[in-house]
Image: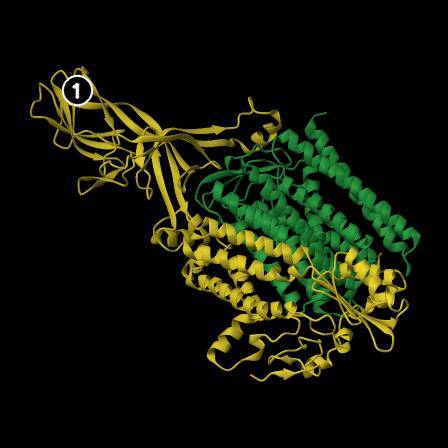
Amino acid sequence: MNNIICACGHENPEGTVLCGNCGRPLTKEAKNQKLADMRYEGTARRSQTYNKSIIDKIWNFFSSVKIGITIIVAILVAAAIGTILPQVLYVPATTEADIAAYYERVYGTFGKIYYELGLSDLYGSWWFQTLIGMLGISLIVASLDRFIPLYKSLKKQRTKRHESFMKRQRLYAQGENILGENSLAKSEEKLKELRYKVTREDGALLAEKGRFARWGPYVNHVGLIIFLFGVMLRALPGFYVDETMWIREGETRAIPEAPGFYLESKEFILETYDKATEDEVFGEAIDRVGTIASNYQTDVVLYKKPEEALPGQTDDLKEVKKESIQVNHPLKFEGYSVFQMDFRLDELKTMHFKLSNKASGETLGDLAIDLVNPETSYDVGKGSKVELLGYYPDFSGFENGEPQTKSPVPNNPAFLVKMFTPETPEGETSFVAIKQTVEPLGDNEFKLEFQNVDTRDVSGLTIRKDKTLWILALGGLLFMIGVAQGSYFNHRRIWIHESTEGHLVVAAHTNKNWFGVKKELDQVTEAAQLPPYIDQHDTEGQELKEDGEKSS
Amino acid sequence: MTLVSISSNLLFVAFVCYLIATMFFGGAVKVSGSKTSASERRWGRIGIIVTIVGFIANLAYFITRWIAAGHAPVSNLFEFTTAFGMMVVGAFILIYFIYKTPLLGLFALPIAIIIIGFASMFPRDINPLIPALKSYWLTVHVTTAALGEAILAISAVAGLIYLLKNVDITKKTKQRFWLEAVMFTLVLVLGFVASTTTFSVMDYEAKFNYVDKEQKEKEIIYNTPPIFGMNEFEALTPGTMTPLAEMPSIVNAKKLTTVTWSLLFGTVLYVLLRLITRKSISALLKPFAQKANSQLMDEIGYRAVSIGFPVFTLGALIFAMIWAHEAWSRFWGWDPKEVWALITWLFYAAFLHLRLSRGWHGEKSAWLAVIGFIIIMFNLIAVNLIIAGLHSYA
């Protein structure tokens, strides 16, 4: 390593811009600058020093803020493109073919191209995830590259700096030492009153406060890294559960991915605002919009299967708790949350039929078919029975003479039945749907007559378990702490030197809010009669200063 | 008088106060020659007092409406935008007490006035809350997010003043063009207010049947003369204008018509202004901005971002995620509003890095601040009205 030896005798590592001891500029560039670049205290950063091996090159790539900003902007633009059309998640189609057709049908050629390019699932695409990953790497590398040298440099900073360092500070003053030996003492007193930490060393004074503000950016970057790490963890099995279940009123079902837990739905409740009973202030809004829902709620009972129970055995479930799941009020147990997400009103539950003689109209008896668990045979009474040969819960028509069902949900139930009566002991076959009766094997003497249906509501619930939540929360918290630390506090330093010619030299630096440090320097200047400082950055302000543009 | 009408009167009082305060700040800037005279301070002081009186009335509007509705009045576009306008004034008062610059008020208050005026064009009745909004997080999330955005907006105001002072408008440059474009956009908002008000005073109403993108028959009511007709429209109100063109089903022709009327009114307004004054708006405002200290404006712009960014992060991302996790079962779902909040956040993150590490001070920083405000307004207006998502409550 080629160390640079400063005029003051201090050895600085290769790549140092300002001497770590006295602050003299060490590079040609720094010597030519009117103001010193104080961003990282002029320390040697790895990325600015080495550029030989592949590792150096990768390190340098990711440590560059320019690259970091490029990645941020790339993510920003991609994210915006993803909002032009709704993402797949929000499209009412499930199969790949339906989705493709949806985009083309609704949004035309543009929609087709959008879909073909994969922009309809942009946030899940490999390249978008890669960008996020690159942002993570950039956060780690760029922070390490800057934090370590900055920390070291501030930790061992000296009170006395070289004249050339002072002159290159943005706030700078040089002039008569009016109070003589008392100048530093007076300044110290005032600075302490302003809560500065003051150190003195033969004729030099350094006042510093809020150094911890300098760590803000690194703390918030650590927060972001932890957050991104948490998000990554959810891809691993066991960390994250996301399931949905449909549960009908009166039903008890095993909760998916929550072994041993069962949920019974007592009732689904849908409430809307009513102009007559609600506060009259809502009247106009209800008139304008129409019906406004006020509550979606499922009253449930949570059960747990005893430890010793056999698999599949559900008869001695233990009640854990009764609860009303509402939007914004999920049911919570053992790390799981169950959310009210969706509902279907009035699903068919039971169908009631009457078995009657077609000619005389005489009724032989009634039967009720449970549409979820139909029995194979129903005893109607008076020596008659009905056998269920086939059940088609969501009947959609015949194909090659065979009745078809679209889904297992009883939206349009149909049955193939055989009816036995004392008069027709060999049985008559009939196909019965809600508004349709087909007699495939010739005319029957008896018929099943549809009477009415019982309905019930179905609740759509989402089950979540997220073991990464605390990691995300920690990341978010650290980010907020760091960003507040860096934004609401400033690192301020004021140097005052007695020069050899009996003059005073004053310099001040802050990482942000120059207005604030100027106000404090004004106070010290007044108290210790220091020479008036100039802002070497604000040329306009200098001209106007005497005009009083600068507010006090 | 009911609480609701007291509330809307208070909002009107606030609105008028802001108008008066703007004039006083204008006076403060105008009278100040090269020296900070006693009269500048006096005009400035009256300006800030009137602003504070207006702000108190505005707060009283907010509180009385809250009591009347039983929930924080931030649940529809009118309420949210009004609250946003109020917070812009609040953020201005905060910054004023740090930097004591009447000039900032001369530009910040008109922006707040335009925002509140814009808000008043949307239905002002009090909505009952839908189940998803019934949570104390509504208050926490929305107010913090709006406050963050309002503080960020102040940085755009400072940026605008910086640009008005420093962009050379005697030469034909890109900067001059874009600066005037920003001014024109502000006039377009006035155009929207003017057209909406005109037609609502006329009580204009035209009903149509149309077929939506899911091939369903629907009914729609226009409150402006229909320039564009909905897909397969059929007029139901006799004696109204026949739409000039029919739009395909994915375009909401009603909103397109509103935008077109705003463009027409705004452009007419802009052309009239230019004809009467024989100056561009930038040139009209430049004499006021000329009094600014660029360094101070740059400092205020940056300070506002560094105060506003953490507040925005907390309100628009962190609180938002916590609530989304309670209400929608996931903390992040790539809903357009969420995405645009992330975009806003990324933009200001880039802004801070460009400024701190790449030395983008002065003009570049001022442009970025103005663009940031445009993104915020896009998220407020376009995402709610154009891109449908979970957040379209209005």
Relative to A283, B55 lies left or right: right
Residue bearing mark 1: A380
- At horizontal 24% and vertical 36% (from top left) the residue drawn is A309
- At horizontal 53% and vertical 60% (from top left) the residue drawn is A222
**Crowdedness near tag 1: few (<14), some (14–19) or many (≥20) residues, C-alpha within 10 Å:** some
- Residue B276 vs residue A521, the one in the foreground: A521
In the rendered image of this protein, does residue B233 appear above or below residue A171? Answer: above
Q: Coloured how?
A: by chain
Chain coloured yellow: which letter?
A: A
Relative to A421, B120 lies left or right: right
Whether residue B256 is visible: no
- How many marks can you see? 1
In the rendered image of this protein, does residue A549 appear above or below residue A391? Answer: below
- Residue B70 vs residue B304, the one in the foreground: B304
Where's the N terminus of chain B, which quadrant? Answer: top right
**Where does residue B354 sit, x and y in percent of width and height?**
63, 66
Relative to B211, B32 lies left or right: right
Q: Color of chain B here?
A: green
> Which chain contains the residue that carries disc 1?
A
Where's the C terminus of chain B, which quadrant? Answer: top right
**Where does residue B26 sit, x and y in percent of width and height?**
84, 51
List the single residue furthest toward the left.
Answer: A426
- At horizontal 87% and vertical 68% (from top left) the residue drawn is A181
Relative to B330, B345 lies left or right: right
In the rendered image of this protein, does residue A369 appear above or below residue B326? Answer: above
Whether residue B187 is visible: yes
